[in-house]
């Protein structure tokens, strides 16, 4: 820094102090505070100059404080300042010359104009020097911002954890964690990365400026910060943050809407089908393909006789309890529920989500369903409802699986000869029995299950006979 220019600036400042004191006596409280702050900053700079301070960083901060308070006063249209404006301007010019810095927009005093106001905007100012925090707080206060300060990088990161902040003004040179590291941590945090960060420094180092912008800084301003330029940057930052917040709200609404769709339609069709429709809209097109699946049909035996004397609300309660329990088990084992027909359930394993183990999945599921009937009947008994018995039929083979119906109304379903075969096996199944076709048994790992003696089914409307096997349970590992 130029010692001659610095001495001239310090001398001009000390001559100003008595005039500042006189104006304080007749000015408003707010102006008096600003005049006092400038006097303190001038005296601090004079002390450093007088003792030959060699620390460039400390000198730059002292110079920036004097220039900052001075330019803040020049921005004011207060009539009390008229007589001393030329002297303040002359002091600023000497300070600018002492630093050797070009007259960038940051170092030029703006034309007097009213600043934008940002009521409701919360700004975090991070700087390790009290005079810099005070200057920035005063300037932002004139813009009607709510100001929160932090004197270190660690304190700033702690503030961001528990306080809703709109913009961060971040000093670059700090003793514990420097501004660049704080910036990097903010931009690495998914909850904070959209937060506008403006770096503020007394160092006009182009490599450093580029580095901060690449890390994620929204802007880089030099001390002392020009008030009009800062106001414009804050306005721009707030606008970007508002757009980001709107996008986040819209994204959250879309996620909630998608979740609602999944939950709502998941009550009518299987989760696998909902997933396929949402992920692949072409899945809505009518048509299907040939798939090897294991079909399941189950129903409550003698259901009509059991409920013919029950009031409708009890019939619905009994059905909902039974179907609710069975649905949970089927879905847990990867089954797709095609439809409910009164007390009957038609489901398939192996479509739309393919699985090489669909037959084993179906048999395992059927065993758990029969075991769950004890719980269903215990609840029925407690509510004064009749106990029920279920029969399950399983059959493996090729069907056409896909969207069936019309453009106005369709469903994901299964058609083909094997559906009819499954129905015939279900007709022959006894209460509390799981009856599987030979094709299903051959497609499973038979060592996992207890298989009863085979029997022959004469299927109505079909040529020949069917060989079927009762599944009596699962073998436990020794």
Image (spheres, grey):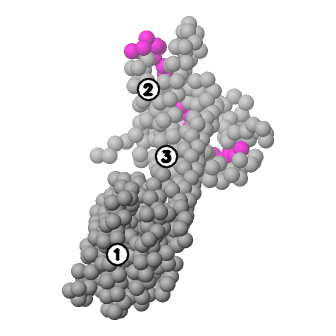
Are there few (<14), some (14-19), or many (20+) residues within 10 Å of tag 2? some
In the image, residue 429 above or below residue 53: above
Task: Name the residue located 36 percent from the left edge and 55 percent from the top edge.
Answer: 29
What is the C-alpha distance between the residues marked 3 and 1?
Answer: 94 Å
Magenta region: 382-403
Q: Name the residue under label 1.
A: 16
Q: Mark 2 or 1, which is nearer the eye?
A: 1
Q: Callout 3: 10 Å neighbours few (<14), some, many (20+)? A: many
Residue depicted at 47% across the width and 62% down the height: 78
> Looking at the picture, does residue 260 appear above or below residue 212?
above
**According to the image, label 2 marks what residue?**
373
Residue 205: horizontal and vertical position, in percent?
43, 85
Q: Distance between the residues labelled 2 and 3?
A: 21 Å
Q: Is mark 3 on a helix, strand or loop?
A: helix
Closest to the camera, between mark 3 and mark 1, is: 1
Residue 253 shows in this picture:
yes
Q: Mark 3 points at which residue?
A: 360
Query: Looking at the image, is mark 2 or mark 3 nearer the viewer?
Result: 2
Q: Earlier in the sequence, mark 2 or mark 3?
A: 3
Q: Label 1, secondary structure: give it.
A: helix
Asked if residue 417 is among those painted magenta in the image, a careful observer would answer no
Judged left or right of residue 279, residue 473 is: left
Q: Where is residue 214 in the image (x, y as percent from the top left)?
A: 48, 77
């Amino acid at each position: 820094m130029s010692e001659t220019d610095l001495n001239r600036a310090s001398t001009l400042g000390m001559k100003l102090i008595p005039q500042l004191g006189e104006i304080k006596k007749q000015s408003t409280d707010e102006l008096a505070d600003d005049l006092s702050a400038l006097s303190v900053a001038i005296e601090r700079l004079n002390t450093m100059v007088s003792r030959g301070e060699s620390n460039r960083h400390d000198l730059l901060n002292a110079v920036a404080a004097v220039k900052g308070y001075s330019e803040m006063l020049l921005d004011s249209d207060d009539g009390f300042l008229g007589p001393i404006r030329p002297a303040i301007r002359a002091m600023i010019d000497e300070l600018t010359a002492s630093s050797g810095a070009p007259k960038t927009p940051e170092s030029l005093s703006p034309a007097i104009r009213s600043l934008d106001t940002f009521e409701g905007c919360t700004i975090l100012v991070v700087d390790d020097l009290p005079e810099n925090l005070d200057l920035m707080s005063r300037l932002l206060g004139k813009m009607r911002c709510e100001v929160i300060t932090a004197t270190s990088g660690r304190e700033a990161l702690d503030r961001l954890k528990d306080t809703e902040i709109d913009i961060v003004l971040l000093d670059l040179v700090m003793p514990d964690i420097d501004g660049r590291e704080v910036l990097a941590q903010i931009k690495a945090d998914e909850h904070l990365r959209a937060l506008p960060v403006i770096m503020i420094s007394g160092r006009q180092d182009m490599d450093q400026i580029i580095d901060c912008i690449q890390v994620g800084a929204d802007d880089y301003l030099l001390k002392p910060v020009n008030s009009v330029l800062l106001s414009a940057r804050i306005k721009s930052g707030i606008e970007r943050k508002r757009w980001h917040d709107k996008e986040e709200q819209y994204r959250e609404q879309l996620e909630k809407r998608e979740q609602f769709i999944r939950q709502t339609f998941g009550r009518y069709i299987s989760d696998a089908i909902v997933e396929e429709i949402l992920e692949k809209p072409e899945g809505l097109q009518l048509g299907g393909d040939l798939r090897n699946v294991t079909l399941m049909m189950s129903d409550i035996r003698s259901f009509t006789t059991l409920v013919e004397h029950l009031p409708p609300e009890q019939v619905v309660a009994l059905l909902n309890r039974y179907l609710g329990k069975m649905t949970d088990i089927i879905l847990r084992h990867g089954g797709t529920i095609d439809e409910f027909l009164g007390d009957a359930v038609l489901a398939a394993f192996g479509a739309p989500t393919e699985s090489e183990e669909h037959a084993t999945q179906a048999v395992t599921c059927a065993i758990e369903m029969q075991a769950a009937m004890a719980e269903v009947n215990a609840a029925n008994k407690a509510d004064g409802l009749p106990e029920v018995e279920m029969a399950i039929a399983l059959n493996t083979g090729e069907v056409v699986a896909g969207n069936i119906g019309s453009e106005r109304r369709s469903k994901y379903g299964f058609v083909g000869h094997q559906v009819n075969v499954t129905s015939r096996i279900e007709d022959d199944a006894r209460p509390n029995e799981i009856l599987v076709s030979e094709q299903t048994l051959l497609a499973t790992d038979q060592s996992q299950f207890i298989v009863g003696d085979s029997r022959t089914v004469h299927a109505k409307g079909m040529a020949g006979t069917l060989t079927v096997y009762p599944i009596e349970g699962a073998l436990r590992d020794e």
